[in-house]
Image (cartoon, rainbow, N blue to C red):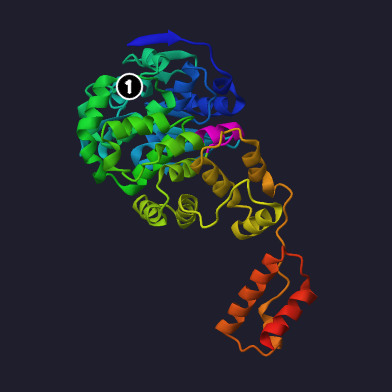
Amino acid sequence: MTELQIEPQPWMTSPQTRAVLGALAAGGIGVRFVGGCVRDAVIGRKISDIDLATDAPPQRVVESLEASGLKVIPTGLAHGTVTAVSGGAPYEITTLRHDVETDGRRAIVAFTDDWEADAARRDFTMNALSLEPGGLLHDPFGGIDDLRAGRVRFVGDPRQRLTEDVLRLLRFFRFHAHYGKPPPDGEALAACRDMAHLLPQLSAERVRVELLKMMSAPDPAPVIRLMRDEGVLDHFLAQATAIDRLDRMVAIEAGLGLCDPLRRLAALLPVDADTARHLAQGLRLSNSERDRLVAMAASEIALSPALDDSARRRALYAVGAAAWPDLVLSAWAAGHDKPDNKDWQTLFNETQDWKRPEFPLTGRDAKKLGVEQGAAVGELLRAAEAWWIEGDFRADRQECLAWLARQVG
C-alpha cells in the first residue's frame, strides 16, 4: 500500500462538495473520493463527475444526507449507491463492497467496511485509487505509477478479473483509449485476446455503453486497430472495417472542436444502410440513433464543396439543418481532402444563416381544384414541391397555384 499526500483540489473544497462531506461527517461516516475524479486529479486533467465511496451502509448514508437537508436520489440502493444533489451537482456515493459470487456477466456483492477488500475487486490499478478529503491518496496496487506511465493494468490476475465480468475486456480497451500509451500491458492484452470469444454473452446495452465511451476518446482509432489485430473486434464489432475513414473523421472533428461518438461509429462502417441498420439493432440503439447511424453510413444525398449555390440550397432543404453536420462530415471523411480544407468547412457552416423555405401549398389547395381526397392529393403536392424546389424556391404562392391548376386541368 502506497500513501501520498497531495494538495486538496478546488473541486474537493467547493461549497457543494463541502456540504456533502459535512453531512456525512456529521453522521460519523468515513468517505473518500474514488473513480474518474481521482484518476484525472493525479494526471492533471479537468474533473467532471465526483464519485465517493463510504464504509457506511447505504441507509445510514441516506439518513445523514437528508438530516442535513440535501436531496437524495436512490440511484441503486440495492447495490449500495445513492446520489446526493448539492448546489445542483450530483455526487454518487457507493458503499464499499466485496464479491460473493460472479458468473462473467454480473456479481453478487456484500457490503463491507474494508477499504482494501473493495479496492481488490476493482478492475484496474488506476481505478483502485482512493483519496481522503484531506488529500491523502491511497494506492494499494501501484495505480499511480501505472496512470502516469499510461499503463492500463488489471488488479491481480487478468484472466480472473475477466472471468468475473467479461465486460472488463471492453473496459480495458476503452481505458487504454482514454489513458493508455503504447505499448499496452502485455499480460492484459494476452488475456483479452484469449477470452474475446466470451464477448457475445454480454447484453447489447452494456456493449453499447462501453463502445460509445470508447468512441469519445480523443483518438479511438489506434485502439480499434489494436482490437482488430488481436482478433477482438470480430467478436462484437465485425462490421468495423473502415478504420482509415475513422482516422479522417477524428482529425476533422478535432479541427472543428467536435467529438461525436455515434458519428465516429458511422465512419467505421462500410457504405451500406443494411449493415448500419443491423448494427443499430444489435446494439439496441434508440430509433433516433438508428436513423442517424443509417443516414451517415449510407447517405442518399451526395454532398460536396463542388455543389453550386442552388444545389447547396436544394440539398440543405432535403437534409435539414439538424442532419446537415452529420452528412457533411461523413462525406468529408469518406474522401481524401485534408481535415483543414476550407471549402468543406464552408459547406459545414452552410446552416449558420439558413432559414428553411416554406412550401406555400397545402392539401386544401389541391382539393379546391377538384382533386379527390386520398393518395392523389399527396402525389400532386409532392410533384408541385419538386417543381418548386427545382426552381430554387423562387415561385411564390400564386405561381405554385397556377402550376397546380395546369396539372389538374
Does residue 98 appear in this view?
A: yes
Does residue 100 appear in this view?
A: no
Q: What residue did someone put label 1 on?
A: 184
Is residue 286 placed above or below 110 in the rendered structure?
below
Q: Quadrant of residue 338?
A: top right
State the image coordinates of residue 389 (x, y, percent, origin top left).
68, 65
State the image coordinates of residue 370 (x, y, percent, origin top left).
67, 90
Is residue 330 placed above or below 89 in the rendered structure?
below
What residue type is disc 1 on?
Pro
Identify which residue is drawn at 45% across, 18% down. 132
Judged from the image, the secondary structure of the residue bearing numbered disc 1 is loop
Identify which residue is drawn at 31% across, 25% down. 118
Quarter of the image containing the C terminus? bottom right
Q: Judge by depth and name the residue closer to the eye, 2 or 326.
A: 326
- How packed mark 1 is, by other alpha carbons closer than 10 Å (few <14, some 14-19, many 20 or more), is some
Asked whether 255 falls inside the magenta stretch, the response is yes
Q: Judge by depth and name the residue closer to the eye, 120 or 321.
A: 321
State the image coordinates of residue 78 (x, y, percent, origin top left).
34, 42
Quarter of the image containing the N terminus? top left
In the picture, measured across the screen, residue 18 lies left or right of residue 271, that is: right
Asked whether 127 falls inside the magenta stretch, the response is no
Give the magenta range: 250-259
